[in-house]
Amino acid sequence: MKKETRLKLNEGYAKLLEGNRDWVADQLATDPTYFKTLSKSQHPEVLWIGCSDSRVPANELTNTKPGEVFVHRNIANMCVHTDMNMLSVLDYAVNVLKVKHVIVSGHYDCGGIDAALSNRQFGLIDNWLRHIKDVYRTHAAELDAIDNEKDRIDRLVELNVIEQVYNLCKTTIVQNAWKERDDLEIHGWVIQLDTGFVKDLNVSVSNADNLGKIFALSDN
């Protein structure tokens, strides 16, 4: 590796550590007990399941502080029923932290959605993108009727979020929680990168009534 490249890498890495020191100093200047208080516990009311895209950080977008939002992120904000990582986060958030809101947050201009709409091979991620292709297959009639490519991609972003909301509702974790309490809701959002605003898709679910007979779990 060239010396100039190595220097740039070191500078970039050092900038992260410097940024951390500046942030700590800013917090302490406002509240000298900030980190002592923060380290004692967390009581978030929200679980955020979002995309890994670096442009959509949960706390900044919602103007919330550390400790207020429990976060899980992956490519294209997927909620796959075999993903033990996501399920473990969901279980902890719902059953231990007792969050009241689970938000699936997608965003327009999502690279994962765009890649899933192509026929290219990208490597290992193709196996993940296949779940998005399944969403397309489910809504193919609506999506194929949209002539404008950008509008079609944007609509798939929305439909993907809605499908992931219902995927969460079908888990035993959420359904069993609903049997015990009535203060848990699952929501679907899309972030508009060019404005910063959130679009609420008005798909908020608080019970299993409309999941379909095959997905409704008995008490046994």
Image (cartoon, rainbow, N blue to C red):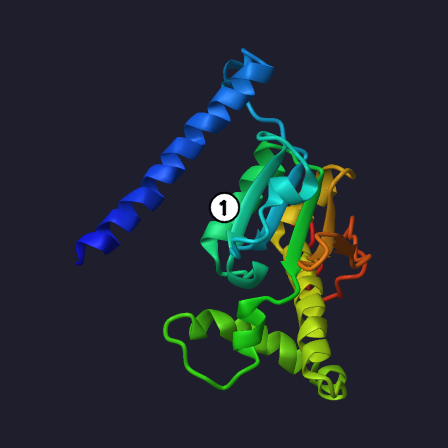
The reply to whether residue 207 is in sight is yes
- What residue is at 33 percent from the left and 38 percent from the top? 14
Q: Is residue 119 left or right of residue 213?
A: left
The reply to whether residue 38 is in sight is no
Q: Is residue 28 above or below residue 119?
A: above
Label 1 Cα neighbours within 10 Å, binned few <14 / some 14-19 / many ≥20 = few
Q: Position of residue 75 (x, y in %)?
A: 51, 61
> Which residue is the site of mark 1?
88
Q: Say which amino acid is labelled 1.
A: Ser
Q: Is residue 120 above or below residue 22?
A: below
Q: Position of residue 22 (x, y in %)?
A: 46, 27
Question: For numbered disc 1, what is the local secondary structure?
Answer: helix
Q: Position of residue 155 (x, y in %)?
A: 72, 73
- What residue is at 58 percent from the left and 59 percent from the top? 77
In front here: 35 or 17? 17
Q: Is residue 123 above or below residue 30?
A: below
Q: Is residue 129 left or right of residue 138?
A: left
